Image (cartoon, rainbow, N blue to C red):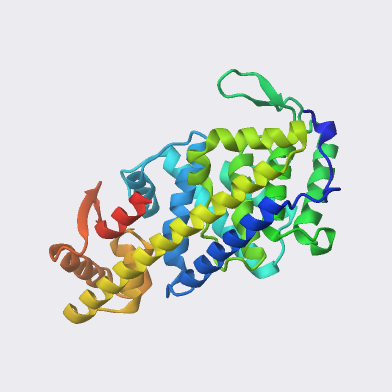
Amino acid sequence: MKFEELKKLPLDKDIESRKILKKLASTHRALAELKGIASSIPNENILINTLGLQEAKDSSAIENIITTHDDIYKAELNLKGFKSLNAKEIQNYIKALKIGFKQISKNKILTNNNIIEIQSILEKNNAGFRKVPGTTLKNATTGKIVYTPPQDYKTIKKLMTNLEQFVNDETLSDFDPLVKMAIIHYQFESIHPFYDGNGRTGRIINVLYLVMNGLLDLPILYLSRYIIENKSDYYKLLQEIRETDNWENWILYLLNGIEVVAKETIALISKIKELNFEYKNLLRDNYKFYSQDLLNNLFKHPYTKIEFIENDLGVSRITAAKYLNQLSRDGLLKKEKLGTGNYYINVKLIKLLILI
C-alpha cells in the first residue's frame, strides 16, 4: 500500500462489530478496576516512576534498544562512574512520557506540537515532521518494502492536522474511545511522520489518550510488553488494514492487549500496596525517623541515594546517610557502591518489578 491510499479520518464505515462490542465490555471493566486501585496508592509518582520505567524499557526494546533493569535504575541516580547510552535513551522516554502527561493534564487536549515535543525528547533532535522523501517500512527478515508512507511534507502535515482534529474533536466520531485509540494508533504509524521514534511516540500517545478520555487518571497502562510478546501479529494486523481494510482483527488485538495488561497491572499494584504496607509498619514501629515522605522515597526510587533523601525529607546529608545506612544494616535496603558514591536498593520492590 502507498500513502495515496491512506484515508483521512473519520472512517466512512461502522467498524464496531458484535465481537468488538462484546470485547469492549470486558476491557472497560478491567480498565475501571485499574483506575480504582491506582487511586488507592498515596503518591502517584510511585506508580508513574516504577511502571513508567518498565514501559520505557519495553517500548525501547521493540526498537532494539536493549538494557537491563539494573542499568535503568543506576542511570536514574546520575552517579559518576556509570555510563549507558541505552539507559540514557530510556531516561529520555520517561521524561517524554511525564511531559506529555503534564501537558494533557493541564490542557485536556493532545496537539501536534505536543507530539512533536514528545518525539524531540525521545530522539534529542528538533527535526520535526519529515521533509525529505525516502522513508519506507520493510520486513525485518526479508528486507522487502511492505509499505510506503507519505513522502512529502505537505501531505504529512495535512494528514497530521486531520489526525489532531480526530484525537481532540469528539463530534467527529461516536466510536467507543478504545476503538478510536486503535484507529489513532494505526493512522499515526501509517503516516509515520518522523524520521525516527515513530513507534515509541505512538505508544506514548496511546496511554495519554486513555488519560485524556478519563479512562485512567495516571499514565500507567503500557502495551509494549504485550506487543513484544505478540510482535508478529502487531505488524501483520496493521498491514492487514492497509491491504484489505479489515479493522476487526486489529481492534480485537488491541482490546485484548489493554485487558490483559490492565489485569497484570492490577495484580502488580496490589503487590506493591502490600509491600508498601509491610514497610510502613516496619518503619513506623522500629524507627523514630519514620515519615510518609521516607516511605514514599523508598518506593518512588527503587534505587535511592543520599541526595534523594535530602531533597524529599528536607534533612542534612549526614542525617540522610544515617537513615539509609541504618535501614541497610537492618536488611530493609541493600547498600551498593558505584564509583565514589553509594546507592541503596529496595530489593523486595525490585523483585516485584522484574517479575512483571
Q: How far from the left and from the top, in percent, is residue 275?
A: 29, 67
- Residue at image position (70%, 68%) is 107
Q: How far from the left and from the top, in percent, is residue 58?
A: 47, 44
Picture mark count: 0
Q: How far from the left and from the top, in percent, is residue 335?
A: 20, 56
Q: Nearer the viewer, residue 10 or 27?
A: 27
Depicted 285 relative to depicted 128: above or below: below
- Residue at image position (53%, 42%) is 227
Q: How far from the left and from the top, in percent, is residue 168?
A: 76, 60
Q: Nearer the viewer, residue 75 or 217?
A: 217
Q: Is residue 101 left or right of residue 326?
A: right
Q: Quadrant location of residue 353?
A: bottom left
Q: Nearer the viewer, residue 69 or 11?
A: 11
> Can residue 280 be seen in this snapshot?
yes
Q: Is residue 48 left or right of residue 237?
A: left
- Residue at image position (62%, 58%) is 208
Q: Quadrant of the N terminus?
A: top right
Point out the residue furthest to the left here. Answer: 329
Q: Quadrant location of residue 219?
A: bottom right
Q: Is residue 339 left or right of residue 6?
A: left
Q: Nearer the viewer, residue 313 or 254?
A: 254
> Can residue 192 be seen in this snapshot?
no
Q: Is residue 318 left or right of residue 11?
A: left
Point out the residue furthest to the front here. Answer: 18
